[in-house]
Amino acid sequence: MSAESFTITPRPDLGILVVRWAEDAPFPQLQGNFLALLAAAREHATWRWLLDVRRRDQLDPELGHWTTHVFFPEAAQLAAGTLRIAVHCSPTRLLVYESSPDQQEYIQYGTAPERSYQLHLFIEEGPAMTWLLA
């Protein structure tokens, strides 16, 4: 995975970090990407994130569990205010989420209103940005 395959773009004018993956990567590398996201969030004091995962086609259950049960809750503890995460995914990826029992479990867990963070899935970037800015 090249450096261009994972980008973090701070949008201080909107108070958002835009994170994009151009391809998939193994779980340890994705963990490193998420830790880089957290470092950028702390540096820019930005706790509204647009995660563009449209080009990541591998759905590793280990990553799903780690993000929803470990990473997002820990990041929420550091947030000044509410951590809001908009996941921009492709329609194909959304179908995989809906057809996989493991993925359904992580999505239901991660999007539950009682979480210490707010997580929503979107197939279009416009509505995702609108939700983040609400």
Image: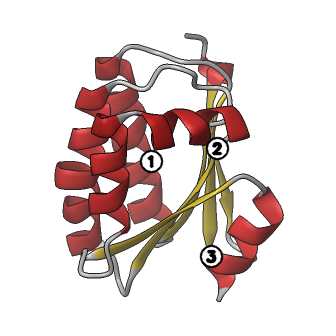
Whether tag 3 and tag 1 are in contact, CB under 8 A, the answer is no
Locate the N terminus and report the quarter of the image it occupies.
Answer: top right
Q: Label 2 is placed on what type of residue?
A: Cys
Please tell me whether mark 3 sits on a helix, a strand or a loop.
helix
Q: Find the residue positioned furthest to the right.
A: 126
**Pointer 2: residues within 10 angstroms few (<14), some, or many (20+)?**
many
Residue count near mark 1 (Cα–Cα under 10 Å), binned few <14, some 14–19, many ≥20: many
Say whether disc 1 or disc 2 marks the residue closer to the N-terminus: 1
**Residue that carries the numbered disc 2 in the rendered image:** 89
Tell me the crowding category of disc 3: few under 14, some 14 to 19, or many 20 or more residues within 10 angstroms, Cα based.
many
* Residue type at tag 3: Leu
40 up-or-down from 6: above or below:
below
Which residue is identified by label 3? Answer: 132
**Location of residue 10 in the rendering, given as x and y in whole percent from the top left corner:** 65, 58
Residue identified by numbered label 1: 37
**Residues at marks 1 and 2, CA–CA distance in whole angstroms:** 18 Å
| Residue 87 disc label | none
Residue 5 % position (x, y):
64, 21
Whole-number angstrom distance, CA of label 3 to CA of label 2: 15 Å
**Which residue is more in the foreground, 33 or 69?**
69
Residue drawn at 62 percent across, 19 percent down = 23
Q: Position of residue 97 (x, y in %)?
A: 48, 40
Residue visible at 60% across and 12% down in the picture: 2
- Residue 43 place in picture, x, y as percent: 44, 61
Examine the image and state in which quarter residue 66 appears. top left
In the rendered structure, the answer to whether residue 91 lies left or right of residue 64 reads: right
Residue at 67% across, 82% down? 133
User: From the viewer's perspective, is 41 left or right of 121?
Assistant: left
